[in-house]
């Protein structure tokens, strides 16, 4: 009689353990798939950043854009060494820029960032 009870109980326990094993396998597969998807996203982000920089470099090879921005940034620097007159012009210019609409100020920042490339701009501003 005891043997007749052990068989079904053992079968029930085996079925339960098999179900737990399959559930654990399924959870592990989900974790692996999630990790692979995250890795793909990170890889695509890195590739996109590199592609952006390459396109920015290609675009600047036949352009005066970078030189123009360098000249514009150099003018206040040079005027700062031209005595009171030069420093006054620089100070008035920066005061006038502070009164410009924010969208204009941000647009100037974006123009410089686009010229330097996105990674160059974020390095300049201390972000990674």
Image (cartoon, rainbow, N blue to C red):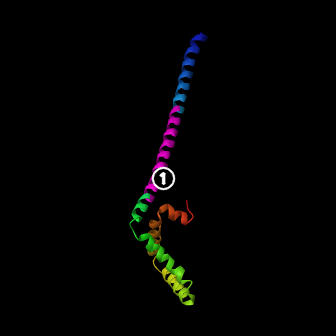
Q: Look at the image and tell me whether residue 103 can be seen.
A: no
- Residue 14 in the magenta stretch? The answer is no
**Residue 94's x, y, as percent?**
51, 81
Q: Which element is circle 1 on? A: helix
Q: Residue at x 44, y 66 (%)?
A: 114
**Residue 107, percent from left and from top:** 44, 71
Instruction: Answer above or below: position of 83 versus 45.
Output: below
Label count reads: 1
Name the spot of residue 31 as percent of width and height, x first: 52, 39
Q: Which residue matches tag 1?
A: 46
Return the residue found at the far bottom. Answer: 85
Residue 128 shown left or right of residue 44 in the figure: right
> Considering depth in this image, is 77 or 39 the residue closer to the camera?
77
Magenta stretch contains residue 39: yes
Q: Residue 71, can we see it?
A: yes
- Image position of 17 with respect to 85: above or below: above
Q: Quadrant of the C terminus?
A: bottom right
Q: Position of residue 126 (x, y in %)?
A: 57, 64
Farthest residue toward the front?
62
SS majority, magenta: helix
Q: Nearer the viewer, residue 98 or 16?
A: 98
* Magenta-highlighted residues: 25-53
Query: Which residue is situated farthest in the right direction here?
Result: 2
Residue under the point 49% across and 42% down: 36
Furthest toward the top, the residue is 1
């Amino acid at each position: 009689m005891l043997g007749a009870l052990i068989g079904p109980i053992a079968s029930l326990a085996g079925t339960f353990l098999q179900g737990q094993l399959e559930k654990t396998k399924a959870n592990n597969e989900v974790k692996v798939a999630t990790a692979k998807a995250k890795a793909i996203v990170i890889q695509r982000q890195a590739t996109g950043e590199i592609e952006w920089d390459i396109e920015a470099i290609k675009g600047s090879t036949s352009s005066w854009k970078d030189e123009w921005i360098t000249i514009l940034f150099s003018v206040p620097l040079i005027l700062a060494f031209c005595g009171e007159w030069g420093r006054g012009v620089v100070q008035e210019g920066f005061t006038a820029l502070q009164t410009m609409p924010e969208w204009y100020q941000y647009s100037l920042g974006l123009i410089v960032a686009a010229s330097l490339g996105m990674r160059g701009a974020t390095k300049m501003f201390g972000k990674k």
